[in-house]
Amino acid sequence: MTRTARRLLEEATRKLAPDPHANRLLPLIARGAARPATLAALALQQREVIASDRRAFEYLSERSRDEPASAAFFAALAHGEAVAQDRLRAFASVCRADEAADTYEPPADCQGYPAYVAWLALNGEPAEVALALSANFAAWGRYCASIAQALRHHYGYDDAACGFFDFFAGPSPDLDTKAEEAVQEGLDAGRLDEDRAHRYGRLLQGYETQFWHALWELDARAGRLP
């Protein structure tokens, strides 16, 4: 059977889907039990992740200048990070993230994901990175949809404050098309190793799990304080 980009993306998304119970913070937020300080920490961490990922995607786009489909995909991701950065401000303001910024120390486990994306920007074959990221984005989108719903229902956040999560939760047919074109470009040129792309994807999911677990631990530790 001929391997196509669409089939590879579908298979990667299925095979690399995280354990439904891997994100221990998500259920806390979903039932309104996460502490306000934890939401502020989430905002501060996302601020750092976005800034790092945006630069990584810009670099990947530049690296891919001889691969136009990959260049277009990573340029679109970089633009999306810029939009997300703007939308994050309302969430950060409502959960008073700026008030905690001066004393907040980011857990090391929260830095693994953006550090690995930066490593991929330097070392990964663009089409393989596109495949790995696309699989990871599927899980991230579901997390964002759940968080946006919980923020409205349990925390009383308005549309502006939920806009960051709404942005990632919604469908993006144009980005999906660009991802498929980037992966197909790599396939056609013989520059895509599926096993290596899946390894990238598994590591991305692992680092994302560490990110959420670190924030869950902050929340749990605060609950144990006298």
Image (cartoon, rainbow, N blue to C red):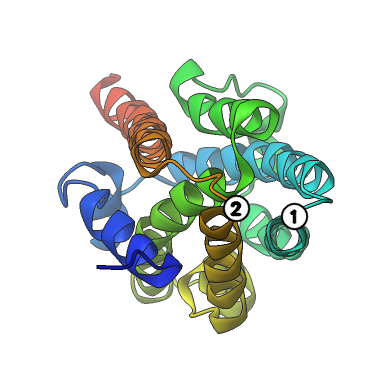
Which residue is at the front of the view, 181 or 117? Answer: 181
How far from the left and from the top, in percent, is residue 107? 49, 20
Question: How many angstroms separate mark 1 from mark 2 (CA)?
Answer: 10 Å
Q: Could you tell me which secondary element the residue under label 1 belongs to?
A: loop
Question: Mark 2 — residue?
Answer: 189
Left or right: residue 135 versus residue 220 is: right
Which residue is at the front of the view, 150 or 94? Answer: 150
- Which residue is drawn at the image coordinates 44% and 66% (left, top)? 5
Residue 148, quarter of picture: bottom left
Mark 2 nearby-residue class (10 Å; few <14, some 14–19, many ≥20): few
Q: Are marks 1 and 2 in contact (CB under 8 Å)?
A: yes
Question: Mark 1 — residue?
Answer: 67
Please state the total of marks drawn on the protein image: 2
Which residue is at the front of the view, 25 or 222? Answer: 25
**Which numbered circle lies on residue 209?**
none
Which residue is at the front of the view, 74 or 24? Answer: 74
How far from the left and from the top, in percent, is residue 201? 39, 41
Q: Could you tell me which secondary element the residue under label 2 belongs to?
A: loop
Residue 46, quarter of picture: top right
For the question of whether residue 198 can be seen, the reply is yes
The vertical placement of 106 against 167, above or below, is above
- Which residue is drawn at the image coordinates 70% and 64% (left, top)? 69
How far from the left and from the top, in percent, is residue 111? 54, 25
In the rendered structure, which amino acid carries the disc numbered 2?
Ala
Left or right: residue 28 versus residue 154 is: left
The vertical placement of 63 against 88, above or below, is above
For the question of whether residue 155 can be seen, the reply is no
- Which residue is drawn at the image coordinates 35% and 64% (left, top)? 3
* Quadrant where the C terminus is found in the figure: top left
How far from the left and from the top, in percent, is residue 61? 78, 50
In the rendered structure, which amino acid carries the disc numbered 1?
Glu
Label 1 vs 2, first from the N-terminus: 1
